[in-house]
Image (cartoon, rainbow, N blue to C red):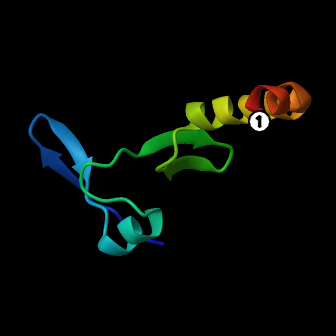
Amino acid sequence: MHALKLTQIGNSVGVILPKEVLAQLKVGKGDTLYLTASPEGMRLTPHDPAFSDQMQAAREIMKRRRAVLHELAK
């Protein structure tokens, strides 16, 4: 667990993430992180939840339409 301190950044408030946390998330300066609500509390992730939902829908379609996609690939 890491304790994070809030700091003033211009007219906003920000948080500084330790190097260890950035390494675990595999992100760096300029990358985007997503903060989402979960049953356990707030979740910080480098993966866009909306994109993940879209990819899951695409996987389901590809699974159902495998034969059609196979023919199109020829």
Crowdedness of circle 1 by 10 Å Cα count: few (<14), some, many (20+)? Answer: few
Quadrant hosting residue 26? bottom left
- Residue 31 drawn at (x, y percent): 32, 49
In the rendered view, tell whether residue 21 sits above or below residue 43.
Answer: below
- Which residue shows up at 12% across the image and 34% down it? 11
Toward the viewer: 19 or 9? 19
- Which residue shows up at 8% across the image and 39% down it? 10
In the rendered view, tell whether residue 16 sits above or below residue 18.
Answer: above
Toward the viewer: 5 or 32? 32
- The residue type indicated by label 1 comes to Arg
**Number of marks in the image?**
1
- Residue 43 drawn at (x, y percent): 54, 49
Name the secondary structure under disc 1: helix
In the rendered view, tell whether residue 6 sits above or below residue 62.
Answer: below
Quadrant hosting residue 71? top right
- Residue 41 drawn at (x, y percent): 59, 48
Of the 4 image quadrants, the one containing the C terminus is top right
Residue pointed to by mark 1: 59
- Which residue shows up at 57% across the image and 33% down it? 51
Quadrant hosting residue 28? bottom left
As drawn, is 30 to the left or to the right of 71?
left
As drawn, is 33 to the left or to the right of 37?
left
- Which residue shows up at 24% across the image and 55% down it? 29
Furthest residue toward left: 10
In the rendered view, tell whether residue 54 sits above or below residue 38.
Answer: above
